[in-house]
Image (spheres, rainbow, N blue to C red):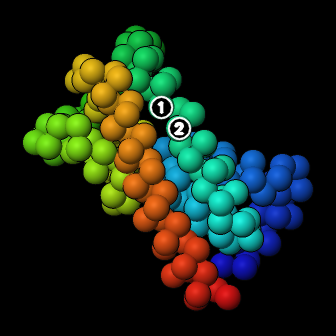
Amino acid sequence: MNTIINWFMNTIGQYISAELSVFLVSMIPLVEERGGLIVARLLGIPMWRGIACCVAGNILPIPFILFFIKKIFHWMSAHHMSGIVAKMEEKAAKNKPKIDRYGFWGLALFVGIPLPGTGAWTGSLVAALFDMDLKKASLSILIGIALAAFIMTVFSYQLLGAVIS
């Protein structure tokens, strides 16, 4: 693990702060806040600052996904990327029944429980593609982000912290 941290600090880390690194990691689909909190812990960022950077980074893409993903998909399909769009729509459709079953709280749990293929990006994608009410979807996604932050903080700063300290 130290090798990865050393590589990072000697390459990208020379040009941006550890906090900005964590913020950017938290914006990446699939990695999101879950990976950001682990990176924050490994970079030695204090817990509350790490949480703030991760939550902010995870929230930033959400409005863009909710408002623009259909237009982006349309543009991608028109520019020979329909295969990618089809895979993303298929992923959203696959997860829709899980969210529909429990409604508002289903989306919050889907975003908040740190499992592969879940998170704010996928939750926002599902909400946008299936025309969920944007206010309710946004609040549900924010609750899910808070839940994920809690779970991953316990994992990153308590469990992982005990292992690497």
Which numbered marker is on residue 157? none
Residue 81 x %, y %? 41, 23
Secondary-structure class at tag 1: helix
How packed mark 1 is, by other alpha carbons closer than 10 Å (few <14, some 14-19, many 20 or more), is: many
- Residue where numbered disc 1 is placed: 62
Residue 50 x %, y %? 66, 58
Task: Identify residue type, mark 1.
Answer: Ile
Residue 92 x %, y %? 26, 36
Q: How far apart are the two marked residues, 2 and 1, measured between alpha carbons?
A: 6 Å
- Residue where numbered disc 2 is placed: 59
Find out whether the residues at labels 2 and 1 contact each other: C-beta distance under 8 Å: yes
Residue at x 86%, y 64% (from the top left corner) = 10
Q: Quadrant of the C terminus?
A: bottom right
Secondary-structure class at tag 2: helix
Residue 63 x %, y %? 48, 25
In the displayed image of the protein, which residue is found farthest to the right?
Answer: 14
Q: Is residue 122 above or below residue 17?
A: above
For residue 66, what is the image quadrant? top left
Residue at x 66%, y 78% (from the top left corner) = 1
Q: Is residue 104 above or below residue 53?
A: above
Residue at x 30%, y 28% (from the top left corner) = 136
Task: Identify residue type, mark 2.
Answer: Ile
